[in-house]
Image (cartoon, rainbow, N blue to C red):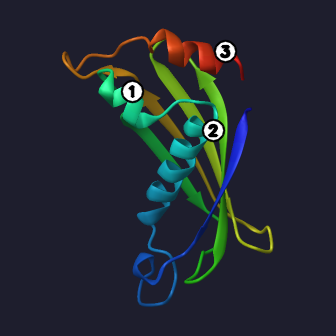
Amino acid sequence: MKEFDFKIRVRYSETDQMGVVYHGNYAQYFEMGRVEWLRNIGISYKWMEENGVMLPVVSLTMNYKKPARYDDLITVKTLFKSQTSVKIEFDYEIYNEKMELLTIGHSVLVFVNMKTGRPMTPPDYVKERLLLI
């Protein structure tokens, strides 16, 4: 599965005084989509961390098209882009209920050994799950 859709309702605390989603919250929406994408293919962040693997974001870009607003039900579409020996990349699209494109994004994450703090190849289980895509 190359893509996964995740829905969330915009909470009041995520908006600014104008009722528009504060720009910094989009990174959290992307993270929620990415975590659920991974969970959907059988990989959990919790399992990776329990097995000594971190997956920090090393690059994140966003482009805002239209604002999301308080109480909107938004869809976060997470698209698997690529995976190299130590990196994994995702694209994101956020839509409102009218299916208007609100925001696009891209992230690069690196598999890191928690003991050494150095990049590493993903565990075999993760590689196997990613090969099924």
Q: How many numbered marks, from 0 up?
A: 3
Q: Marks 1 and 3, Cα distance to the nearest angstrom?
A: 17 Å
Counting residues from the start of the chain, the first of labels 2 and 3 encountered is: 2
Counting residues from the start of the chain, the first of labels 1 and 3 encountered is: 1
Q: Amino acid at mark 3?
A: Leu
Foreground disc of the pair 2, 3: 2
Q: Amino acid at mark 2?
A: Asn
Q: Amino acid at mark 1?
A: Met
Determine which residue is flagged by label 3: 131
The answer to whether 116 appears left or right of 37 in the picture is: left
Residue drawn at the location 65% of the way across and 68% of the way down? 74
Residue at the outermost right position: 98
Residue 81 in the image, given as x and y percentages of width and height: 65, 30
Determine which residue is flagged by label 1: 48
Quadrant in which the N terminus appears: top right
Is residue 55 something one can see in this rendering? no
The answer to whether 27 appears left or right of 106 in the picture is: left
Name the mark on residue 10.
none
Numbered disc 2: secondary structure: helix
Numbered disc 1: secondary structure: helix
Mark 1 surroundings within 10 Å by alpha-carbon count, few (fewer than 14), some (14 through 19), many (20 or more): some
Determine which residue is flagged by label 2: 40
Counting residues from the start of the chain, the first of labels 1 and 2 encountered is: 2
Numbered disc 3: secondary structure: helix
